[in-house]
Image (tube, helix red, strand yellow):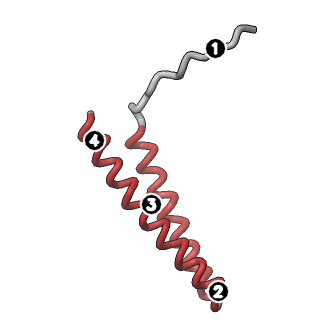
């Protein structure tokens, strides 16, 4: 079997849709984590809060990328 070292074509046709779904999933994870924080204290609570902050930053980055993708279409 010959080795194919040819790269796959860059298909960005559904990037916006994928990014939108990632935002929905990440937002859902934030809400689930916040619901469980009532049962946490101290370090665990701080870790969840920090992770949710990183998730919010990721959502902003994904929204920015959607904006860029829409401009490129």
Looking at the image, is 58 positioned above or below residue 46?
above
Asked whether the beta carbons under mark 1 and mark 4 sit within 8 Å of each other, the answer is no
Question: CA–CA distance between discs 4 and 2?
Answer: 41 Å
Query: Can you identify the residue that label 3 sits on?
Result: 58
Residue identifier under label 1: 4
Under tag 1, what secondary structure? loop
Q: Do labels 3 and 1 touch, CB within 8 Å?
A: no
Q: Earlier in the sequence, mark 3 or mark 4?
A: 3
Of marks 1 and 4, which one's residue comes earlier in the chain?
1
- Farthest left residue? 71
Q: Earlier in the sequence, mark 4 or mark 2?
A: 2
Residue count near mark 4 (Cα–Cα under 10 Å), binned few <14, some 14–19, many ≥20? few
- Residue 6 is left or right of residue 12, and the answer is right
Q: Of helix, strand and loop, which one carries label 2?
A: helix
Percent of width and height locating residue 47: 60, 79
Q: Could you tell which of marks 2 and 3 lies nearer the N-terminus? A: 2
Which residue reaches farthest bottom?
A: 42
List the residue tagged with mark 2: 43
Within the image, what quadrant is residue 40 found in?
bottom right
Residue denoted by label 4: 70
Earlier in the chain: of badge 3 and badge 1, it is: 1
Q: Nearer the viewer, mark 3 or mark 4?
A: 3
Residue at (46%, 44%) from the top-left corner?
A: 18
| Residue sitting at x 50%, y 61% | 26
Q: CA distance from mark 3 to mark 1?
A: 35 Å
**Observer-nearest of 44 and 14:** 44
């Amino acid at each position: 079997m010959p080795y194919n070292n040819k790269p796959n074509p860059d298909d960005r046709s559904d990037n916006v849709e994928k990014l939108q779904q990632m935002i929905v999933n990440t937002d859902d994870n934030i809400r689930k984590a916040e619901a469980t924080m009532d049962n946490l204290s101290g370090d665990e609570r701080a870790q969840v809060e920090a992770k949710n902050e990183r998730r919010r930053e990721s959502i902003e980055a994904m929204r920015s990328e959607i904006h860029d993708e829409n401009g490129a279409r």
